[in-house]
Image: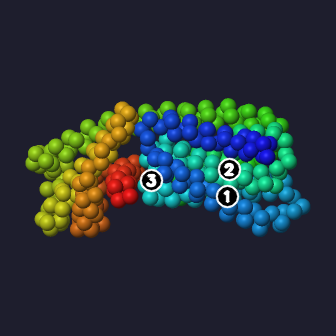
Amino acid sequence: MMSLLVNTIVSLAPVFIFLIVLISLDSYKLVRLTAILRTLFVGGMVAVIAYFLNKWLAPSFVQTLTLYTRYVSPIIEETLKAIFILYLMQKNKLGFLVDSAIYGFAVGAGFAVIENFYYLQSLHHASIMVWLIRGFGTAVMHGGTTAIMAILSKSMFDRFGKKYLGMLPGLAAAIFIHSLFNHFFLPPILTTIAQLITLPLILVIVFTYSEQVVRTWLEMGMDSDVQLLDYILTGNISETKIGQYLISLKSKFPGQVVADMLCFLRIHLELAIRAKGLLLLRNAGFKPAIDPEIKDRFNELKYLEKSIGTTGKLALSPILHTSPRDLWQLYHVQDLTMRKKTTRTA
């Protein structure tokens, strides 16, 4: 009984320790705990699906099982894990490389937990060395490959804006690393040590770079948003190039629609500034309060979005921040608002 407990801890603890370290490195607290727990659960469900797929396909490779574990199962498992990351990107829930890495590693961690539970049942007489390799090697590999895939996919999406095609380089990298791990070119213990040296180094570099990106985006974005909002609130917008552009739209849209466009732009800016303010407060160690009026602003934003229509939004696109990162910040504020509302209801 004691040996089973030790084996369980050794096989599962490393991946959770690694995940906790990643979360602690996130100084802006971009990912909340409930989202991480939900992602771990999703990763576990992915492992269950992968188990049944592998069980169904493996008999076809009974004469070349090594070929299957090296080339087929990595494709199945990494593709299944990538689906959730694609979903998060589609919903604009990934804003930076930092939260992409955390979500990616959490998916892989959930996958590794279920996989190791399965092996704990079937290989319960295995030596402690097996569980050390599975804990520090295989489990961390599952988290690391998905984290790298999420980082590369987010980077490609930010650069080119193509969600599906942008996933391919990251997915290919994850499959390659997973396949390389399963080849066992080195003894398992050396492979595990090499992984524990390279993976933290890669993620630390990514986190450092992303923190700089976040800081620059906050400083530059906040200044431009505040300045533009000030022009709108003081009525001096007509003196700017943006104001002149809005005036030119009067010849193409009814006056009421142009007025709704200006209101849409104002509320969008207010919410964007609020999102950046929340991140700055978190980075400074403060717990920001949620404005009870934010929910009403989102409702008004949705109403105005319908009022101006798709053509109106396209007309605003030259001045409206609609990059994946800017869309993420609106989701971030809305998510915080809904969470606060749920807490009060409970």
Q: Are marks 2 and 1 in contact (CB under 8 Å)?
A: yes
Single out the residue that lies furthest toward the right. 63
For residue 155, side relative to residue 75 (left or right)? left
The structure residue drawn at horizontal position 35% and vertical position 53%, both measured from the top left corner, is 340
The first of marks 3 and 1 along the sequence is: 1
Give the labeled residue for mark 2. 112
Q: Residue at x 77, y 64 (%)?
A: 55
Distance from label 3 to label 2 (Cα)? 23 Å
Other-residue count near label 1 (Cα within 10 Å), few / some / many at <14 / 14–19 / ≥20: many
Q: Nearer the viewer, residue 31 or 285?
A: 285
Whether residue 301 sits left or right of residue 286 in the image: it is: left
Residue 63, image quadrant: bottom right
Disc 2/disc 1 C-alpha distance (Å): 8 Å
**Amino acid under disc 1:** Ala
Q: Viewer-proximal residue, 158 or 49?
A: 49
The residue beneath circle 3 is 93
Amino acid type indicated by mark 3: Lys
Res 35 seen here = yes
Measuring from the top left, give residue 112's x and y in whole percent.
68, 50
Q: Secondary structure under badge 1?
A: helix
